[in-house]
Amino acid sequence: MPRYAQLVMGPAGSGKSTYCATMVQHCEALNRSVQVINLDPAAEHFNYSVMADIRELIEVDDVMEDDSLRFGPNGGLVFCMEYFANNFDWLENCLGHVEDDYILFDCPVICRLYKKHSSSLFSAKWRKEKGCGLVSQQFNLEFISGILAALSAMISLEIPQVNIMTKMDLLSKKAKKEIEK
Ligand SMILES: Nc1nc2c(ncn2[C@@H]2O[C@H](COP(=O)(O)OP(=O)(O)OP(=O)(O)O)[C@@H](O)[C@H]2O)c(=O)[nH]1
């Protein structure tokens, strides 16, 4: 049975968790099963239940508090993702018991992580073995940097990608017209 997933990616505060929560509600209303996996070691709270949480494996606060490592928030996050890549069995085990579910991966914020790590984390081999057809999301607030980040994720991941502009409701009528143009 093939499994499908979305990697939900984007800058800090762009609405990744809100998107996951909305998708969960939407799928529940359609009587369809969807699972969320938190891959953000710096996440604080979610308003949905998660099937697996990377913070069970490693948490950015623990890395930053470690006197031998002395990382700040960004270095700590990179360290966590490297640790995750080296302990990928954790995710394999978490996924082991679901067969036909649709999975949302709520990803961490730093875009360069996707370039450096995601293509190896979610390699073509892994996707083939797991039968996952991944669809990634890229949220943008700062238009040009957002588009470049989306392009970078698209090139490094080589999977179908949907770019979503969040917080459009905050724009004035005039600004919305400009965007439409
Ligand atoms: N007005 C508006 N607010 C939104 C929208 N999407 C998200 N928000 C708000 O933006 C804030 C951040 O949303 P999150 O879903 O936590 O964003 P995130 O990308 O998961 O954040 P990090 O995990 O911290 O990177 C929250 O207060 C949301 O309620 C939207 O489409 N419109």
Image (spheres, rainbow, N blue to C red):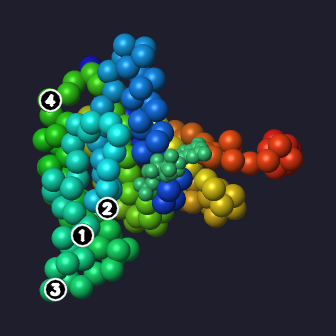
Amino acid tagged 2: Ala
Q: Which residue is mark 4?
A: 97
Residue behind mark 3: 67
Is residue 119 in view from this perspective? no
Left or right placement of residue 96 versus residue 31 in this view:
left
Residue 33 falls in which quadrant of the image? top left
Distance, label 1 to label 2, CA atoms, is 7 Å
- The amino acid marked with disc number 3 is Asp
Label 1 sits on residue: 61
Asked which secondary structure carries label 1, the reply is helix
Query: Does label 2 or label 4 sit earlier along the sequence?
Result: 2
Q: Is residue 152 visible?
A: yes
Q: Position of residue 115 (x, y in %)?
A: 45, 62
User: Please, what is the three-letter code of the amino acid marked with disc 1?
Assistant: Asp
Q: Is residue 115 left or right of residue 70?
A: right
- As drawn, the label of residue 42 is 2
- The answer to whether the residue bearing label 1 lies less than 8 angstroms from the nearest atom of ligand 1 is no
Position of the C terminus by quadrant = top right
Give, as a three-letter code, the residue at label 4.
His
Q: Earlier in the sequence, mark 4 or mark 3?
A: 3
Q: Contact (CB < 8 A) between labels 1 and 4? A: no
Q: Tell me residue 65's x, y (percent).
A: 20, 78
Disc 3 secondary structure class: loop
Q: What residue is rendered at 15% in x and 34% in y?
A: 96
